[in-house]
Amino acid sequence: MLAAFADPVFDSQRVFRQLLQAMARPALPRALPVLPPAPAPVTSAAMAIVLTLCDATTCIWLQQPSDEVARHLRFHAGVKLVDNPQDADFALITDPMAMPPLAAFARGELRYPDRSASLIVQLPGFRGDAGLRFAGPGIPDIRTLAPTGLSANFWTQRAALSAQLPLGIDLYFVTAEHVAALPRTTRWLED
């Protein structure tokens, strides 16, 4: 079995600070300071997020489950794995082109909007200097981000969920070493 963080307390705190900044400043890529080993098909950046945000009270849905990934997550984070995306607190998306529709994940309830899913979506890459335009809390005017590897209708699905605020899902897009977050309050500005 692969190791996790070399120093679990301090490494997870360092990653957590970057995740907070990513959520506070949506669509702005941030380098993750610690990248633990991860079994394929999970990337080290995605594993850093899981090890930081998930514990024994967390239910995770794996898009591409494997015995090795399941053992790794259960041993290092103590998470519960679920078979249904609707039951997940977090979903680990390793093949975004084949992911279920966003409506398949928990969006919360009006009395409890926090009972929604957060998706950790592994992407081949993204650029912050061009691409889609976003606005909302944490974005002074407009911010651009060009994520690659998403299906053609992903943004239409995301826009439909945005109309349901305070319900929705939060997204962490990860590449090999970076994360860019899109909280449910971030709006995609269609051209």
Image (tube, helix red, strand yellow):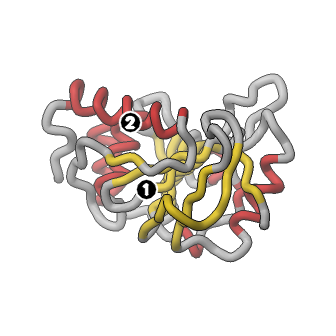
**Would you place residue 23 above or below residue 44 in this image?**
above
Q: Amino acid at mark 1?
A: Val
Q: Earlier in the sequence, mark 1 or mark 2?
A: 2
- In terms of depth relative to the viewer, which is nearer, 57 or 154? 154
Taking the image as drawn, is residue 106 in sight?
A: no
Taking the image as drawn, is residue 48 in sight?
A: yes
Q: CA distance from mark 1 to mark 2?
A: 12 Å
Q: Residues within 10 Å of mark 1 (few under 14, many from 20)?
A: many
Q: Position of residue 185 (x, y in %)?
A: 71, 39
Which quadrant of the figure has residue 138? top right
- In terms of depth relative to the viewer, which is nearer, 84 or 129? 129
**Would you place residue 74 above or below residue 153 in this image?**
above
Q: Position of residue 157 (x, y in %)?
A: 76, 61
* Residue receiving disc 2: 18
**Would you place residue 160 above or below residue 130 in this image?**
above
Secondary structure type for disc 2: helix
State the residue at coordinates (67%, 52%). 134
State the residue at coordinates (50%, 61%). 129
Q: Amino acid at mark 2?
A: Gln
The quarter in which the C terminus is drawn is bottom right
* Residue receiving disc 1: 174
**Would you place residue 56 above or below residue 45 in this image?**
above
Q: Position of residue 113 (x, y in %)?
A: 74, 30
